[in-house]
Image (cartoon, grey):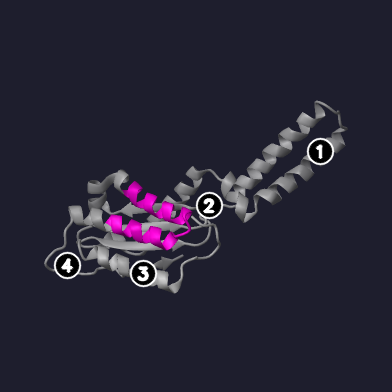
Amino acid sequence: MRPEVGSPLANSDHQRIGEAIAAAERNTAGEIRVVVATQPLTNTHIYPVLWAALAALTLPWLFVLFRPLPVIALFAAQIVLFALVALVLARPSLWRAVTPRKARELAAREVALMQFLALGIHETRDRTGVLILVALADRVAEVVGDQKIHGCVGHEGWRVVCTHIVEGGRSGRIADGIIAGIGETGRLLAEHFPPRPDNANELPDHLVIV
C-alpha cells in the first residue's frame, strides 16, 4: 500500500466504500465493517534501534581488523554509528523495510480483534459479522470473521480478501482494492449465509478511520 501518513482516501472514496458494503450485504445475512488505520500499528522505533545496535557492535570491529584503533576511539565510533544508523532507519521511507512483516501482521491482527469487539461486530444475531482492517502505513490487511462465518470460510478465504486489498494498494488504487475486498467478502458471505426474509442491516455501513 502507499506509505503516506494519514488517509489517502477522498470523501468520494468513503462514499464508494460505504456503497460497496451496502451492495455486498444485500445478498447475505452477514454484516461487513471496514476499518482503515492511518498510523503505524507497530513500534516504529524498536527495529531501527535494534539494527543500529547491531551495526554499532559489529562494523567498527571489522574496521579494527584492518586498522587498530584505541579503545576510546572505538567506543566513540560505536556511539556515532549507532546514532547515525538509528536516525536514518527511523525515516518513514525506511522503518518499514527493517520491520519484519510478521511483526506488522501480528500488530494488525491485535488491532483488528480490538476493533471487532469495540464495534460490536460479535453481537450480530447470527454471529456472521466480518471486520476488514486496512493498515495503510504498515501495508497489511487483516480480516476477522465471527465464529459462525469463520468456520465456513477459514483463513484461505480471508487471505483472498486481503490479497485484493494489498494489490490495490501496490498499484496506487487503495480504494479500488478495498472495494474489491468487500466484494469478495460479500461473495463468501452470500455463499454460506444468503439473505433472510427479515434481513436487517444490523451494523453501519460507513468506513471507520482510526
Q: Which residue is mark 3?
A: 16
Mark 2 crowd level (few <14, some 14–19, many ≥20, 10 Å Cα): some
Mark 3 crowd level (few <14, some 14–19, many ≥20, 10 Å Cα): some
**Nearest to viewer (mark 3 / mark 4):** 3
Instruction: Measure the C-alpha gap from mark 1 to mark 2.
Output: 31 Å
The answer to whether residue 23 is left or right of residue 93 is left
Asked which quadrant contains residue 207, the reply is bottom left
Mark 4 crowd level (few <14, some 14–19, many ≥20, 10 Å Cα): some
Q: Which residue is mark 1?
A: 75
Could you tell me the amino acid type at mark 4? Asn
Identity of the residue furthest to the front in this view: 171
Identity of the residue furthest to the right in this view: 70
Marked residue nearer the N-terminal end (3 or 1): 3
Instruction: Measure the C-alpha gap from mark 2 to mark 4.
Output: 39 Å
Evaluate whether residue 114 shows in this view: no
Give the magenta-colored segment's residue range. 158-185
Q: Which residue is mark 2?
A: 42
Q: Which residue is mark 4?
A: 199
Q: Secondary structure at mark 3?
A: helix
Measured along the vertical axis of the image, is residue 169 above or below residue 67? Answer: below
Instruction: Measure the C-alpha gap from mark 1 to mark 4.
Output: 70 Å
Looking at the image, do the residues carrying marks 1 and 2 touch, with CB atoms under 8 Å apart? no
